[in-house]
Amino acid sequence: MAARTDHLVTSGTFSLDGGTWEVDNNVWIVGDDAECLVIDAAHDADAIAAAVGDRRLVAIVSTHGHDDHIDAAPALAARTGAPVLLHPADLMLWKQKHPDTSPDGELADGQVLTVAGTELTVLHTPGHSPGAVCLHAPALGTVFSGDTLFQGGPGATGRSFSDFPTIIDSIRERLLTLPPETVVRTGHGDGTTIGAEAPHLDEWIARGH
């Protein structure tokens, strides 16, 4: 059976720079009936574990270190034995939320993760955070963009450790070069496609948001 993508929305808070906001997060589960991996263990380890079911959890992949994307990761790892993977440039963000633990492994640009016979290539896309990554699964025709690219523009860059020119470079060089029909599965909200977003790059730069 080919890998499929299951989708879960969990709710909680995001805190950074002294502020806290209510957020809904997309949790993506890629795999088949035997094994899967979780992209962004957000807020609710119980709900994510229930969605995984009796499948072997290969890895818990964090697209970046903001607390709303990693808050449930240690609890899910403890329940399943799966390693938590994060790009090392976001370790300082992880430590703000989980000072007494560390991720189990590092993500690196070009690294290939395999689940249910399907390859996901790690694309380092800094800007929203220094260690932000996207996961490109050509066989599924999709890219999991975390908070780097959304329907309507780039992720936010107004807080610590983020940079607008950097995220624009990441999107231009790493994401908009993907096939236009590639489905973008985002960290929050509705998805989009590369082809739908690519024509608007100059608008985003002009907005500088």
Image (cartoon, rainbow, N blue to C red):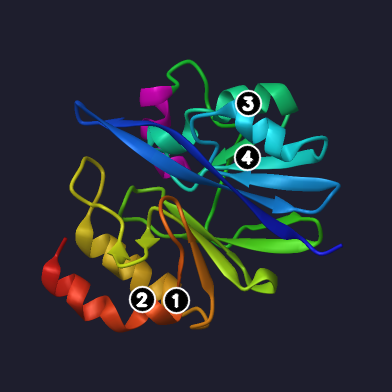
Distance, label 2 to label 4, CA atoms, is 28 Å
The residue depicted at 38 percent of the width and 53 percent of the height is 147
Q: Position of residue 137 (x, y in %)?
A: 63, 66
Chain part drawn in magenta: 87-97
Q: Which residue is mark 3?
A: 46
Q: Earlier in the sequence, mark 2 or mark 4?
A: 4
Q: In front: mark 3 or mark 1?
A: 3
For the residue labelled by badge 2, is the local secondary structure a helix, a strand or a loop?
helix
Q: Amino acid at mark 1?
A: Ile
Residue 60, numbered circle: 4
> For the residues marked 3 and 1, what is the alpha-carbon distance in whole angstroms?
33 Å
Considering only vertical position in the picture, is 108 above or below 193?
above
The main secondary structure of the magenta stretch is helix
Q: Badge 2 is on which residue?
A: 197
Label 2 – label 1 distance at C-alpha? 5 Å
Amino acid, disc 2:
Glu
Q: Earlier in the sequence, mark 1 or mark 4?
A: 4
Q: Quadrant of the C terminus?
A: bottom left
Q: Position of residue 114 (x, y in %)?
A: 74, 56
Query: How far separated are the C-alphas under marks 2 and 3?
Result: 34 Å
Front: mark 4 or 3: 3
Q: Point out the frontmost of discs 1 and 4.
A: 1
Instruction: Judge depth for marks 2 and 3 and give the one in front.
Output: 3
Q: Secondary structure at mark 3?
A: helix
- Is residue 90 on the magenta stretch? yes
Q: Which numbered disc flags the more N-terminal residue, 4 or 3? A: 3
Q: Residues within 10 Å of mark 1 (few under 14, many from 20)?
A: many
Dot 4 amino acid type: Ile
- Residue that carries the numbered disc 1 in the rendered image: 194
Does residue 19 lie above or below 28 as drawn? above
